[in-house]
Image: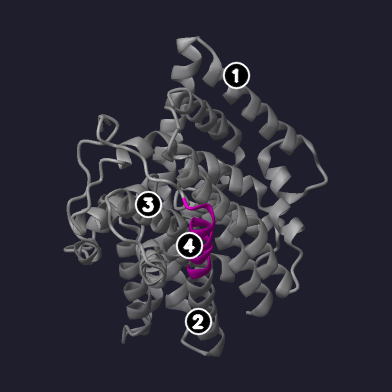
Amino acid sequence: MCVQHFLKSKRKPNGALIYFIAIILGIISGFSYFPFLQSMGLFISDVFIRIFKCISLPIIALSIIVTLSQYNTGDKMKGIWQRTLFYTISTTIIAASVACALYLLISPSSINTANFDPGYLPTALPKSSYASYLINLIPSNIFSPFLEHQVMAVLLVSMISGIAIRYIPDQESCNTITNFFKGAHGIFLVITGWIVKIIPIALFGFITTTVVQLRNGVNISGLGGYLSVIVLANIVQGLVILPAFLYINKIKPFQTLQGMLPALSVAFFSKSSAGALPVTMATIERNLGVSPKISRVVLPLCTSINMNGCAAFIFTTVIYLMQNNGIEISFVTMVIWVFIATVAAIGNAGVPMGCFFLSASLLTGMDIPIVLLGLILPFYSIIDMIETALNVWSDSCITKVIDDKTKL
């Protein structure tokens, strides 16, 4: 029995057992003092991260190109795009607003960073402003978005390409190029099916890596309030706001969550919503019965712009560092940053540590010292896992609602 059977039917327990065994073995490996086990887990994690990164962007690009090249801008397709954008922006604003409310409620205290050695900081933090970040998303050549793993740039190129195919005057040429992209898309779907079958191996590697990282943690004194805001904001968004969103649209939240567990577990341990996209797509189609015509349009778009967890992190981190550097934080300032965090999250790539570096870019663009990020960094691994799972959960909720509201 393999994971494929578990995705197809919740009545067969062996798939869940395989997941459980993989998680236990990963924990044992991470806590063990056997270098071979840890090295094997870290090696497996690195291999699967590379595989996910390799196939995620082609899946996004080909899904959008094939869909846009085959559908006109009629009422149904227009409705899908409008609903996706509306739900994405709405849920992201709510996520940042929840973080704002919790920040006001918890009021995390500042900490003394005078004697802090920022040795944890990466050697190359972003030095440009967010405006420069957005400009860099416009590719200088058609291959750079794929080589540099710029998800938003890939989305832009794919949308333009898919629309342009429909306007090719020669119908034969139009059909030829459309069939080419359909065939390429089919190749990656087959590869995705193979990967889904061996996902427990990936979980073993991801969990081993996570446990090893957590064993190297530091004292959280002075950061408890800050971390509480971020974690609670993600929990409220994931277990209150999004289930309410499903319930309002007459969808059973618990059954939806249960059906998406395979994808959420991969997202949690891989820390990449873009990397988890193939598994998310396969899971939502098999377990929730979402039409491929919907999932292969909405999910790639949501993966690129629907970053609920990232919005909460950006808001909380920027406000906290501003506070720690003596900048007065008024209620108006916080409201403004709710919207800035929303826009920033939409422009963030769904890759590991994307929110961390984007927050650093925003802060350096305002000439705010980022030394405190070095103290936050050791805890970012677990934050990133929670955020990524929330992002994929939000993507799944939006896709399920749109599928129920749209009949293609």
**What is the C-alpha distance between the residues marked 4 and 2?**
27 Å
Which mark is in front, 3 or 2? Answer: 3
| Label 1 CA crowd tier, 10 Å (few <14, some 14–19, many 20+) | some
Up-down: is 312 above or below 17?
A: below
The residue identified by callout 2 is 82
For the residue marked with disc 2, what is the amino acid? Gln
For the residue marked with disc 1, what is the amino acid? Ile
**Marker disc for residue 28:** 1
Q: Secondary structure at mark 2?
A: helix
Q: Secondary structure at mark 1?
A: helix
| Label 2 CA crowd tier, 10 Å (few <14, some 14–19, many 20+) | few
Quadrant where the C terminus lies?
Answer: bottom right
Tell which of 103 and 37 is nearer to you.
Answer: 103
Among the two numbered marks 3 and 1 on one chain, the one whose residue lies closer to the N terminus: 1
Using the rendered view, name the quadrant where residue 243 is placed: bottom right
Up-down: is 93 above or below 387?
A: below
Segment colored magenta: 93-107
Q: Position of residue 382 (x, y in %)?
A: 49, 38
Q: Position of residue 112 (x, y in %)?
A: 32, 37
Q: Residue furthest top?
A: 34
Which mark is in front, 3 or 1? Answer: 3
The residue identified by callout 3 is 320
